[in-house]
Amino acid sequence: MTSLDLALVGNGTVAALIDALGSVSWCCFPRFDGDPTFCSLLAGEQPANANGTFEIELEGSVRSEQEYLPNTPILVTRFFDGSGNALEITDFCPRYEAEDGMFCPPVLVRRLAPLAGRPLVRVGVRPASAYGCEPRHGVSGANHVIYPGEPPLRLAMTASVQPVLDAVPFPIHEPVTLVFGVDSAIASLEDAEVMLDKTKKEWLGWWRNLELPGEWDEAVIRAAITLQLCAYESTGAIVPAITTSIPEAPNTGRNWDYRYCWPRDAYFTVAALSRLNQLRSPERYLDFLFGVAGQSGGSSLVPIYDLDGDGIPAERIAPCLPGYRGMGPVRVGNKASEQAQHDLYGEAVLSADKLFPGSHRSQSARPREGVDEEMLTRLEAFGHQAIKLYDKPDAGLWELRGVQRVHTYSSVMCWVACDRLAEYSKRVKREARAAFWREHADEIHSVIVKRSWNTALNAFTATMEGDSLDASLLLLPRLRFIRPDSPRFAGTVAAIEKQLKHGDFVYRYIERDDFGFPENAFLVCTFWYIEALASMGGARKEEARALFEKVLSARNRHGLLAEDLDPRTHEHWGNFPQTYSMAGIIDCSFALAERPRTTTG
């Protein structure tokens, strides 16, 4: 069991992490990047009177079990005492199609039901505000509590709320529902049983349309659901994780706020969902991307946007939260938003790959109609940025805070922008444009091969004229920059194995950065390594398969992965759950599977 033995429930507006004892460890309102109403995950030793807790306890409990309803993000926790009483908690956030679109209100529903006997239950609700600094004081009615503030929140119950206010146990002899969320959203909700049934049907219908690899399907489905829960329904923005400041390694200060939209991270989510023939979120994300680019006046992109496509808050420290296991600081905002990161333009163009007419996609997929020329024109604006920036210094995909260099990955992604624009132009029979983009792609390719190849290392390097490595070089075949059977790629893989592989896991890099030397493995790098080995074929593909199984065994009991992993103990670190890691499960399953299949339900 990992320290991050948490389950994720959500609906694309809000998301909650539930621990093994049924407590809400983390949940922000009114959306992913809001003030954490429940924040015990970052409360250090969690004193009994801490703000930001939501606990449900069975008096005298001696045993518990927890699982998702199959192929849904609906969580069931059961408790058993020593006297024959048993309690079941069903946690979910409503999500289903309604007349005016997807219904996903900013609320968490917690249904309590007696399984045996007459369980005695204690419910404790202490909402926080100002990142744990202040309690939210409630104003109670017969079966609800209003918590004034911004936004006003409400706890509604189908029984008297007084035992909750008094923090005293009360017997459960029939199901009791607690609904917590934004006050205005709760007022118009349907019956909880109806919402639960509709939500369950929505998710079961969603997963039945997945195009699965045929192996590891259960892991892939859980990964896909997790990615979908990180897509903000209102605007199409995609977050890398729903938490802030879980450190990458103990007491390192590598604590970051991931509750915003990175175009780079979003691309990997989009690519994974597209492989599964889920194109709705990719389409909506591309519209979001076009929107933020249009606001810039020149189609320039910044590394991070808030969920509405605006700038994010200046990075600051939340003074009242000690941090995960007391390992602060807890950061709000992210200073990486101020950096130059030139790979964004390639990832932006790639995000359209499965949506663009003529892509290699499932026969069941439908192209966006009537937008061929418009889409190409908008994407070409990203290509022009790539031409200007491919050989200019930036902070790179690892967002180094203290130095700028010409990073090979950034340059390769600029090449990707031109290469794919040449391909897209041919798809819509614009031969002159195809020739233009092909000429620039060839020029950039030539420069990278000349300046990023290190003969002494027999490998491509992390930077032009550099002598260090980073794991992003494992993506070169996937990006079609180089063939997987190329001797140069084999040399690069061998060099990465020698320098960056520690046991079974691959590090991003091993050189000192702004915070010292990396201590834990960045999980997606190991997935990239698995994918690279699979592309090389033969015995290397068998190595990849064995390693993939090992990484899957490191998931928590709910099938989720954080950002980082201690290669010795397999303990999870970093923000959670991490879309990079969950996308890696999907990407590797397809790289290793013999042939994909479509579910039949």
Image (spheres, rainbow, N blue to C red):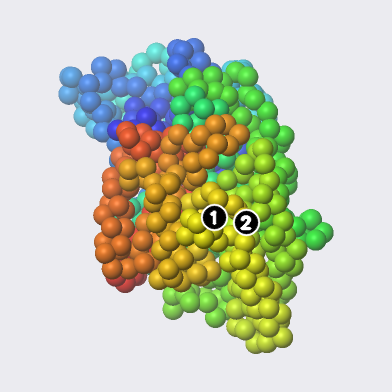
Can see residue 500?
A: yes
Rendered image: mark on residue 461:
1
Amino acid at the residue labelled 2: Met
Question: To which residue does mark 2 refer?
Answer: 464
Can see residue 104?
A: no
Where in the figure is residue 211, as x and y percent of width and height? 38, 67
Would residue 151 be found to the left or right of residue 597 on screen?
right
Would residue 486 be found to the left or right of residue 412 on screen?
left
Residue 331 vs 526, above or below: the answer is: above
Q: Which of the pair 348/488 is nearer the observer? A: 488
Write the residue at 31% across / 58% down. Answer: 544
Q: Which of the pair 209/424 is nearer the observer? A: 424
Residue 371 falls in image quadrant: bottom right
Mark 2 burial class by Cα count in 10 Å: few <14, some 14-19, many 20+:
many
Quadrant (top left/top right/bottom left/bottom right) for the N terminus: top left
Where in the figure is residue 206, as x and y percent of width and height? 42, 60
Q: CA distance from mark 1 to mark 2?
A: 7 Å
Amino acid at the residue labelled 1: Thr
Numbered disc 2: secondary structure: loop
Write the residue at 36% across / 67% down. Answer: 536
Numbered disc 1: secondary structure: loop
Would residue 529 be found to the left or right of residue 173 on screen?
right
Mark 1 burial class by Cα count in 10 Å: few <14, some 14-19, many 20+:
many
Where in the figure is residue 75, as x and y percent of width and height? 36, 40
Q: Are marks 1 and 2 in contact (CB under 8 Å)?
A: yes
Where in the figure is residue 333, as x and y percent of width and height? 66, 35
Q: Which of the pair 587/367 is nearer the observer? A: 587
Write the residue at 69% across / 61% down. Answer: 390
Residue 433 vs 219, above or below: the answer is: below
